[in-house]
Amino acid sequence: MSLIPATILTGFLGSGKTTLLKRVLAEAHGQKIAVIENEFGEENIDSDILVSDTNEQIIQMSNGCVCCTIREDLRTTLKDLAEKKRKGELDFERVVIETTGVADPGPVAQTFFMDDEIAETYLLDSILTLVDAKHAVQQLNDRQEARRQIGFADQIFISKSDLVSKDDLDALMHRIKHMNPRAPQKAVHFGEVSLKEVFDLRGFNLNAKLDIDPDFLKDDDHDHHDHAHGEHCDHPSHQHDHAHGDHGGHGHHHHHDDDVKSFVFKSDRPFDPAKLEDFLGAIVNIYGPRMLRYKGVLFMQGTDRKVIFQGVHQLMGSDLGPAWAEGEQKCSKMVFIGIDLPKDIFLQGMEQSLV
């Protein structure tokens, strides 16, 4: 049986998760989707609507929230679903997990890597984060959960953008880009999103990500200009010199010193595998809970293939990717997204792990 793709849908209350979910279920074009709901309290009304609108199987967890310590709950539910599928009692092709508005998606994502039985049955495809344009600034200022949800995302959908001015929307997107440069952002209306933007994003499958995203090794300039200077890794890492898009010089990103930030390490010298493993092991031990997502393509001594690396919190893994192409500039690029991570220590440690 091939692996069942799973999508984690996260976002604060009112960001439109249920609207998006209902649309996806209604528009599933023959795809059978199992939904695991983790809302609690009054939110359960939503699942009644969902159940009556579609033939999907909604699993409502009795004790509500999936965050933090109640991971057993999610594992049991995923195992039950897989078991029913094997026995032919349930027919579905993919799973969507809707987390509570205040959940940290980290433990949910880790469930797919830590449990062998789950890992042999499911493939975590991506984490989608919905952001409510009208209330996002307040939520990001006040709630670390909202900032973490941005940090974890593979794709960000901004809802209710019609309720804010263009300048405010630009400022919000600019701010989010600083927190998580790897996740594409899209303003959406009332859940009108095509399925190809929701499923099979391969956020956790880096080899695939590289096949479809040749820009991953280029510079982090994000406005998709033809930036020739990004072709090689011969300049120091920098935190997005956004001189070209700074909205009339207001410098929006200086107003918010968010604790969730990203930074990039680059080098065209190869890594010493043993040194790098030691260094990463050490930082994950100390900073793991604050490391939300980190991934990279690494130039390693001793192999002619790219080494694809990624992690969530304390869990990290690497894989051999495609061979470096003839004449391709070999270089490493690693993106770290986390909460108050000491950039200097990370960059210096990576530098010291080079051959």
Image (cartoon, helix red, strand yellow):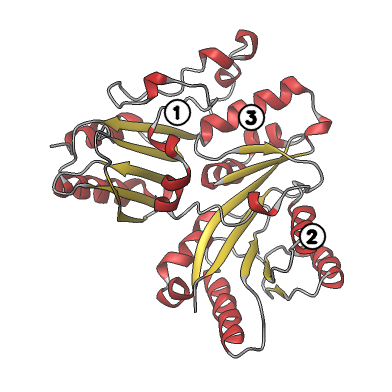
- Whichever of labels 1 and 2 marks the residue nearer the N terminus, that label is 2
Q: Position of residue 250 (x, y in %)?
A: 62, 11
Picture quarter containing residue 160?
top right
Q: Position of residue 176 (x, y in %)?
A: 59, 33
Tag shown at residue 173: 3
Q: Position of residue 9 (x, y in %)?
A: 64, 55
Q: Is residue 10 visible?
A: yes
Position of 118 relative to 349 (above/below): below
Say left or right for 229 vs 244. left
Judging by the rendered image, the residue that carries numbered circle 1 is: 220
Picture quarter containing residue 103?
bottom right
Position of 80 relative to 300 (above/below): below
Tag shown at residue 22: 2
Q: Position of residue 290 (x, y in %)?
A: 43, 45
Numbered marks: total: 3
Tag shown at residue 106: none
